[in-house]
Image (cartoon, rainbow, N blue to C red):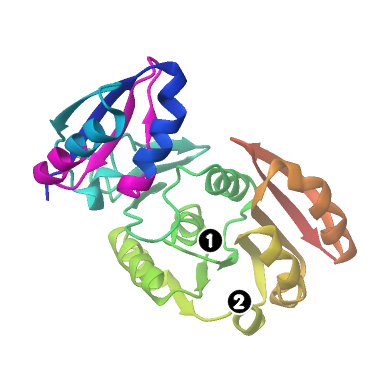
């Protein structure tokens, strides 16, 4: 299917009314350009012609419309555009599709997130990676809750963890994570479990370091399981929260027996490393 764009020009007085009509007629959002042009879309040339004809009848000559074909795009891979290597402390995160892939790099994580969360581009993931890079001790056993693409668990092993276990509710994400661990040649030191972290984390522990890059609304009820999954004096890294949520989460982890070690904000996303009693 080849999509077509329809550029519509009308007077400022008619623009809002015409935009609403286009939304109703097409069922699609309408883009308003800086010059006032309204842009909508049709699934093929015939649909574009029909919309232009209907527009002429509706407006009675008060608008002008031109249609143009759009480049065919494979959106299953187009999201990769603009993604590149990122360096976070001693760690480099490198997309697998770049020609300069170096999978043997000791501190290079070669990643293809596919449909799973965790590419290294999101601020919450970068903040978690930065705290992990600073606070992981060689030989640590690491738990990663909500492991997604496996990026944090893989990074932990690349940085010197003895082993890691990722826990994820999405079995499909775990399939992606397993492929990424194999791509980085660390699969023998990482396991990925499918299920509820509240049930599995205490069974998989005790961990020296635990990562929980999840929403605050999920991190909060998970705290008892996180405490149970950590060894005494173990470190938890909480991420997945916007900067404005910091004031809400600080007293919650303090009440759970954690002492804040370091906080970090990345692109508006807040993360905290905290030590258990």
Q: Which secondary structure, mark 1?
A: loop
The residue under the point 10% across, 41% down is 45
Residue 143 found in image quarter: bottom right
Of pointers 1 and 2, the one earlier in the residue sequence: 1
The residue under the point 55% across, 42% down is 123
Q: Residue 9: x and y, percent?
A: 30, 20
How far apart marks 1 and 2 lie (CA) works out to: 20 Å
Work out whether residue 235 or residue 4 is closer to the camera in this orientation and state it.
Answer: 4
Q: Which secondary structure, mark 2?
A: helix
Q: Badge 2 is on which residue? A: 197
Does residue 202 show up? yes
Image height of 46 relative to 200, above or below: above
Q: Residue 84: x and y, percent?
A: 34, 36
Q: Residue 131: x and y, percent?
A: 63, 46
Magenta stretch in the rendered image: 24-51
Work out whether residue 102 or residue 32 is closer to the camera in this orientation and state it.
Answer: 32
Q: Residue 161: x and y, percent?
A: 53, 61
Question: Any magenta on residue 46?
Answer: yes
Q: Quadrant of the C terminus?
A: bottom right
Does residue 231 show up? no
Image height of 257 relative to 18, above or below: below
Work out whether residue 169 or residue 42 is closer to the camera in this orientation and state it.
Answer: 42
Q: Badge 1 is on which residue? A: 161
Image height of 152 relative to 230, above or below: above
Question: Any magenta on residue 184?
Answer: no
Work out whether residue 229 or residue 37 is closer to the camera in this orientation and state it.
Answer: 37
Point out which mark residue 176 bears.
none
Q: Nearer the viewer, mark 1 or mark 2?
A: 2
């Amino acid at each position: 299917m080849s999509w077509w764009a329809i550029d519509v020009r009308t007077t400022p007085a008619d623009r809002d009314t015409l935009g609403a009509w286009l939304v109703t007629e097409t069922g699609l959002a309408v883009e308003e350009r800086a010059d006032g042009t309204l842009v909508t879309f049709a699934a093929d040339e015939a649909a574009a012609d029909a919309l232009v004809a209907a527009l002429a009848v509706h407006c009675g000559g008060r608008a002008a419309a031109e249609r143009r074909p759009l480049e065919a795009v494979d959106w299953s891979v187009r999201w990769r555009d603009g993604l590149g290597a990122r360096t976070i402390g001693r760690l480099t995160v490198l997309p697998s599709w770049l020609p300069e892939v170096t999978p043997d790099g000791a501190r290079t994580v070669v990643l293809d997130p596919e449909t799973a969360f965790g590419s290294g581009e999101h601020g919450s993931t970068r903040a978690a990676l930065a705290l992990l890079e600073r606070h992981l001790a060689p030989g640590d056993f690491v738990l990663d809750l909500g492991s997604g693409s496996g990026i944090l668990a893989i990074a932990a092993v690349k940085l010197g963890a003895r082993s890691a276990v990722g826990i994820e509710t999405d079995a499909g994400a775990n399939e992606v994570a397993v492929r990424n661990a194999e791509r980085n040649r660390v699969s023998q030191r990482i396991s990925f479990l499918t299920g509820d972290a509240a049930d599995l984390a205490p069974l998989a522990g005790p961990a020296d370091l635990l990562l929980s890059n999840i929403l605050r609304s999920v991190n909060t009820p998970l705290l008892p399981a996180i405490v149970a999954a950590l060894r005494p004096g173990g470190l938890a890294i909480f991420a997945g929260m916007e900067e404005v949520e910091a004031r809400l989460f600080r007293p919650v982890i303090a009440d759970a027996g954690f002492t804040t070690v370091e906080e970090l904000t990345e692109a508006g996303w807040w993360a905290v490393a905290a030590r258990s009693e």
